[in-house]
Amino acid sequence: MTRAALQFQDLTLGYDRHPAVHHLCASIAAGSMTAIVGPNGAGKSTLLKAVAGALAPLAGAVLFEAARPRVAWLPQAADVDRSFPLSVGAFAAMGLWSRIGMFGGLGRGDRARLTAALEAVGMAGFADRPIGALSGGQMQRTLFARLLLQDAELILLDEPFVAIDARTTADLMALVARWRGEGRTVIAVLHDLEMVRAHFPQTLLLARELIAHGPTAEALSAANLLRARAMVEAPDPFAPVCERGPA
Ligand SMILES: Nc1ncnc2c1ncn2[C@@H]1O[C@H](COP(=O)(O)OP(=O)(O)OP(=O)(O)O)[C@@H](O)[C@H]1O
């Protein structure tokens, strides 16, 4: 049987007790590449936040196989504060913090790792550029350099290719494919269904509730996509506190 990297156990998530994700049960296999797909407002980012440990469940749990794995989380580009006066090198080097600490200096090995990560994302030569002076694509490459340095077992990507050109997307997608080869577990929120079909073997289709989870071709069937759309088109911005008991 495939080892599970994590399990959603009757997981309900929300804000001010109003649920955005209801009673989700699913298991993500270790070393798998899973796309999270669903309409706007379906709860996809909320789910990633919970996996990252940034949002406590209203009910249920996110269970990890043993100890909590090293998690790297790429938030949506809009959530990244670029006004902070940091260079590309200093920003990417934050990926090393779990090993060297916030105030630890970079040793020679760390500096070599930083240079290699910037090269891998096509940002060699940009180390001293302030992050506020980067284009959207360059910033996304820098975020990926930070991810590379985090060396995490579980990698969470929230819409990593929004407003990124085809060349940058292809370069960064190649890095994601490499992570899979290294046995890391990748979960990515994506809207581009062609990209999902081409690169992500597993898909979890979410529309506040679980619509489908499994091999991508099956999960993204026309019937499932229609159901997902219908679920979210019934807007409930003031959804009541969930009263349903555990499944
Ligand atoms: N910080 C917050 N406080 C209150 N409500 C929130 C907060 N963040 C998200 N929500 C609400 O939770 C629901 C799910 O939002 P979420 O961002 O998880 O959806 P999503 O599937 O990622 O959407 P999109 O595709 O538009 O990014 C939405 O109704 C949203 O308005």
Image: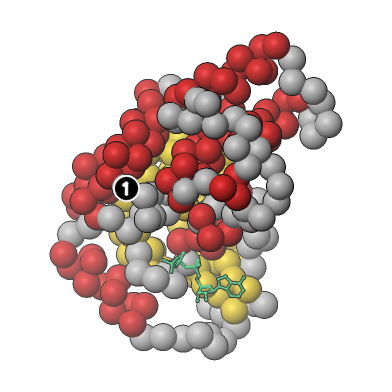
The percent position of residue 39, horizontal first and vertical second, equals 35, 69
- Whether residue 101 is visible to the viewer of this picture, yes or no, is yes
Q: Which residue lies furthest to the top in this view?
A: 108
Q: Please name the amino acid that badge 1 sits on.
A: Asp
- Which residue position holds label 1? 165
The percent position of residue 124, horizontal first and vertical second, equals 50, 25
Choose between 242 and 46: the one closer to the eye.
46
Q: In this view, does 178 lie above or below 216?
A: above
Secondary structure, mark 1, is: loop
Residue at the spot x=59%, y=79% of the render? 18
Residue at the spot x=38%, y=36% of the render? 172
In the image, taking residue 184 as reference, residue 164 lies left or right, namely left
- Whether residue 69 is visible to the viewer of this picture, yes or no, is no
Q: Residues within 10 Å of mark 1 (few under 14, many from 20)?
A: few
Residue at the spot x=68%, y=34% of the render? 90
What colour scheme was applied to this rendering of the protein?
secondary structure
Q: In this view, does 179 lie above or below 234?
A: above
Choose between 238 and 117: the one closer to the eye.
117
Q: Residue furthest right?
A: 103
In the image, taking residue 194 as reference, residue 129 lies left or right, namely right
The percent position of residue 19, horizontal first and vertical second, equals 55, 75
The percent position of residue 9, horizontal first and vertical second, equals 53, 55
